[in-house]
Structure formats: C-alpha cells, structure tokens
Image (cartoon, helix red, strand yellow):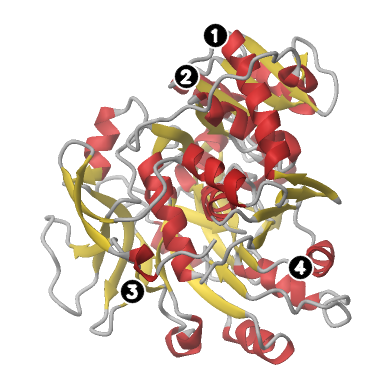
Amino acid sequence: MKNPTHRFDTHYETHFANRVIRCFRQRPDSVQAMLQSALEHNPEGDAFVFQEQHVSYRALARQAARAAATLHGLGVRPGDRVALVLRNGPAFMHALFGALWLGAIAVPLNAREQGAGLALIFADCTPKVAIAEADLVERLHRGGATQGLAALFAAGGDAPGARPFEALFEGAAVDPPMALPDQEDTAVLLYTSGTTGRPKGAMLTHLNIAHTVKLWEKAMDLRFAERSVLAVPGSHVTGLMGIIFTMLHMAGCTLIMPRFDAAEFNQLVANENATSTIMVPAMYKLCLMRANFDVLDLSSWRVGAFGGAPMPESTILEFQERLPHLRLMNAYGATETSTAVTAMSPDHQLEHLDSIGQVLDCVDIRIMDEQGQECPAGVSGELWISGPVVIPGYWRDSERTAENFIGGYWRSGDIGDIGPDGYVRIFDRKKDMIIRGGYNIYCIEVENAIAYHPDVAECAVIGVPDPVLGEKILAVVCSRENNLDADTLRRFCADRLADYKVLDFVHLQAEPLPRNANGKVMKTTLRERLPHPETEPC
C-alpha cells in the first residue's frame, strides 16, 4: 500500500455548521472505510494479536459482521449507543468493531470505573446494549446501570442477568451490510470527568478520527502493516485513537497486552516484531529496568511516542545508548482533541526537554488571556486549540459545550506559550488535575468522594511528585471528631472511585484548610506548608 507523496496535502473546509478548518484532502471517510481498506489490502494480515492468538482482518470482519447482526436483531440502529465495559482483549476488539459495523456509537468505558460512575455515564448516554467483563456485571447491577438495557452480554464467564459473550456471534444467517456514516456522525463517545466531577461524553466523529490517524501516520512515520503495542487501556483516547484506529488505518496490527508488565512488554516486542508504541514515560523507564531488556532482540522497535508527563533526560540518554535505533518523541493532546495536536521531532528531543513539540498539520493553537484576547509574543496564557481533530462538543450537554468551545476552539485549561521557533511549552494546568501514571484525575471528583464520609469536615486533594507515576494523590483532611484514620478513608473511597483515583497519602489535621477572601481553598499555600508532607500512606 504505497501512498502518493501528496497524501498530506491540505485545504480549508466547513464542518460542524460554522467551523472553517484546514483538513487533509486525502483521508478516510470513516472508521468503516478504514476497515474496508484493510480488508482489501491486507485480508490475511494480523488485525490484532492477544496471548499468541493471531486474528486476521478477514476474521475480525467476520466476527464484527456477526455481532452487528445480533445487535441489529436486538433493535440497535445507527446512532444508538453500545457500552463496552471491557479490558484489553479480543472481546473489546470484536465488540468495538461489531458496534461500528452497524453504525452504532461505541462507548468504551474504563473497566476500573466503579458502579456509581458507570451509572452516571449510562444515564447520560442511555446505551441500548452493554457488553461487560463477567466479573464487572455485578458492579453494573449494583450501580443501577443495567436498567433499561435491551440486552447485557458478559465476556469471560457467566454472570447473573447477562447473556454469554459468545451469543453475540450466533445466529447471523445474513450479515447486515457495513454502515456508511457521514463523516460528521459520532463514532465513539469517550467519557471524561472534567473539573466538575460530573462525567461528560466527548463526541468523537469520523472526521476527528480520520484526521487523528493521519496525524499519527505522519508524526511517527508509520508504514503499511505497522505493529504497535497496546499497553494502555483501549478504552482511553490514546489506546483507542493512537493505536487501535491508527493501526486499522495502516492495515497494521494491534499487539494487545491485558495489563502492562515491563518484562512481558519487552518479550512481546521481541516475539511479535513490534515497531511502534505510545506510552507514558514511566513505562519506558520500567522497560529499561527489566533484566530481559538487554538479552532480547528489540531491533524491530523503531519509534516510541510518549505523553502525560515529561521524559527525564536520563531516560532518553539511556535509550540512545542501549537502543540507538529507537526514536522517542513527545506528544500532547486530550480527549477533546481526539489525541495528539503537538509532537516533538525525535532529532530535537534533547534540545527542547521543556517543550511538548510543534503544532501538527491542520491544527491551530492560540495563546489566550482571561479576557479571550490573544497574548503578545512571550506572554503565557491558556492554550486554545482548533482543527479537524477537535470534537464538536459533549453529548447532550449544550451548556458545557458552549463553556468549553468558542468559535471552533477548545479551551484546554493548560497554561503555556509558543516560542518564536514554534515549540510549545506548558507551564501549569489551569484545571485542578493530577496526572498519575498517565491517567487524568480531577481533584474535585476525589474531593467529592471524600466529603461523603460523615467524619470529614473538609478536604483538599493535591498532587505530589512521584518518580515512577509522575504524581500521586495526597488528601489533606480535617476530621469532625478527630477519630478518622487513613485506612478507613481509603476503603470508603475505594467503593466510589476507580482504583487509580484512590488516595495514595492522607494528611489528617485539626486546623481548618487555608482559604482566601472568597472562601476558596488555597492549594498553593497547602503545598508550601507541606513541601515534604508527613503523610500517612494508604
């Protein structure tokens, strides 16, 4: 599959009613068109590999069509939502493409989300069918998420009130034709909590996805039949957009890890000739630290993107020494941008360690002040981002869409600048957010969970540096009766939050939290008071 040199030519188009944006002239029309192209050009090639199970594009399409037929028989129609509460594995891939084959909107959800969060999301997107891991079905029932479903399927075992996952592929005597959606139709809903703690569904359209995979193709110099390791959740924007859909676009292979383990990752790269990766910096460091790194043939591993935190210079230098052919590149994006909007050329990584790279094709980033005016050169402000990768808004939430999207620009909440050489830097987050191991954790959501405990008078959550995860979660808590302990509070939060959001450290104190004249907790003051907090680890 050789693309002509003009495959990245651009021009302006009008989309989403009133946005005039630069787009690639040559691009896929939809996710379905990418699947059709992969079937045409690489039918017997690996679509994905999972624990030595190789599934070709022909086999993936066959199962997707059967799943689509079953979903159609249950009343699912184009535009209906199908929720996927699945871990990385074959069930996720077959369910995802089965829903998309039919033209339904796939709603991949983090399998670590708890019942209350799942119930809120289900109430918002009202899926017609849900497909979940068998051990998570009870969590759905307990949270009330299963009410109103036409059907619930359980993967990996039996579960009360659920049909076996295998039933999704039975009885499809006549496969429905693959849907041909409009490029502005929503393909996927990805939920993000946001600063209010209330989930909001980012509407990723086929237009967004088509441009995302083109950007990854160019930035990472991807090739036909590329092989990329999925070591992050497929339900996350990075895994879904940067790996699964991008490999589909390249008629390539997604090498699926059920969970990240550095030694197993190194072995997978060697065994399956992996060529590319997208991970957080801590994962790369852990790969270097494993004893099998130097004894395996990792020569196929050509390019590795990272984001979510800076890559330490020492890690980059160690990779250069031990794996000199691997090109590391920083990238920056968000769910609302469908993934990366800036990327760092690997050749200039060490020269610009404080930068997230340069703006990618078709993307426009403006540095704006609090009044919505563009900042003068050299003055920092909020990054406003536009382009064909920026979503049209949030699912059935006109208020928060209007608040976060202005004139086609998404207000990122990140504070930074763009230098005269075009390199973008981020100095701080306007949003009160912690990035722990690549996961975005909004402090308000954790604070709300803590505040439900009857012995908590007030609390504040801040991030503390961690050499492996980037940041960990510290809760400063004032108890009503001074009889609260960290273990009790952690167990209380574990029932209400995804496990990666549960407290790492708790600082219990009798004195009130510092507040300004408007009554807002001054977290900067908290950090100054606790530069090396005497925390009680959970």
Q: Amino acid at mark 3?
A: Val
The reply to whether callout 2 and callout 1 are in contact (CB within 8 Å) is yes
- If you read the primary sequence from the N terminus, does the residue marked by circle 2 or circle 4 appear first? 2
Find the distance from the CA under tag 2 to the CA under tag 4.
38 Å
Judging by the rendered image, the residue that carries numbered circle 2 is: 80
Judging by the rendered image, the residue that carries numbered circle 1 is: 75
* Res 184 → quadrant: top left
Closest to the camera, between mark 2 and mark 4, is 4
Judging by the rendered image, the residue that carries numbered circle 4 is: 273
Closest to the camera, between mark 1 and mark 3, is 1
Tell me, for residue 312, which label it has, or none.
none
Find the distance from the CA under tag 2 to the CA under tag 3.
39 Å
Mark 4 Cα within 10 Å, few/some/many (few <14, many 20+)? some
- If you read the primary sequence from the N terminus, does the residue marked by circle 1 or circle 4 appear first? 1
Locate residue 50, reporting x and y percent: 79, 48
- What number of labels is visible? 4
